[in-house]
């Protein structure tokens, strides 16, 4: 079974992270795994359903679609912690001063 290449029926506002369009299979899986780890660490057992869905989403387009909805159903503080951590980990790093590119 191969990973989904696009995220069907998502609102434009939900097309970020692992749900972004145009990701390679490897990049989508990496983002799903990163998000799954963050949810597990931030939410513990009350994020278990989302963790399981993110795991399934690596190979199942329906689970990929469900995962964005499940993320939206997290308690607002948990959702903010998950999203800010994910964003911080995926923020482009500024080049170090004095380094040559």
Image (tube, rainbow, N blue to C red):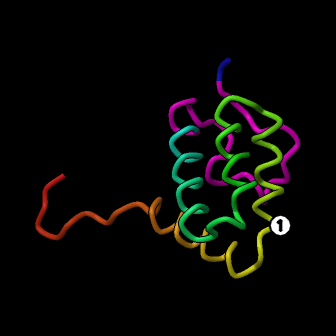
Residue corresponding to mark 1: 73
Residue 22 lies, in percent from the top left, at: 63, 36
Name the side, left or right, on which 27 lies relative to 80. Answer: left
Dot 1 alpha-carbon crowd within 10 angstroms: few under 14, some 14 to 19, many 20 or more:
few
Q: Is residue 45 above or below residue 81?
A: above
Q: Is residue 70 above or below residue 58?
A: below
Residue at 76 percent across and 79 percent down: it is 76
Q: Along the line of sight, which residue is nearer the eye, 51 or 89?
A: 51
Quadrant where the N terminus sits is top right
Name the side, left or right, on which 20 lies relative to 76. Answer: left
User: Please, which residue is most extreme toward the right here?
Assistant: 9
Q: Magenta segment, which residues?
A: 3-28
Question: Based on the displayed image, in which of its 4 quarters is residue 7 positioned?
Answer: top right
Q: Along the line of sight, which residue is nearer the eye, 26 or 47?
A: 47
Tell me if residue 10 is in the magenta stretch. Answer: yes
What element does badge 1 sit on? loop
Tell me if residue 46 is in the magenta stretch. Answer: no
Residue 69 lies, in percent from the top left, at: 83, 56
Residue at 59 percent across and 53 percent down: it is 36
Residue at 84 percent across and 48 percent down: it is 10
Residue at 58 percent across and 71 percent down: it is 42
Question: Based on the displayed image, in which of its 4 quarters is residue 29 positioned?
Answer: top right
Question: Based on the displayed image, in which of its 4 quarters is residue 96 positioned?
Answer: bottom left
State whether the magenta stretch is mostly helix, strand or loop.
loop
Q: Along the line of sight, which residue is nearer the eye, 55 or 30?
A: 55
């Amino acid at each position: 079974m191969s990973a989904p290449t696009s995220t069907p029926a998502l609102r434009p506002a939900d097309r970020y992270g692992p749900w972004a369009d145009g990701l390679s299979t490897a990049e989508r899986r990496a983002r799903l795994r990163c998000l799954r780890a963050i949810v597990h660490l931030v939410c513990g057992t009350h994020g278990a359903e989302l963790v399981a869905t993110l795991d399934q989403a690596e190979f199942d387009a329906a689970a990929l679609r469900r995962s964005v909805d499940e993320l939206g159903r997290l308690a607002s503080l948990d959702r903010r912690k998950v999203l800010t951590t994910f964003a911080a980990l995926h923020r482009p790093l500024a080049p170090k001063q004095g380094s040559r590119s």
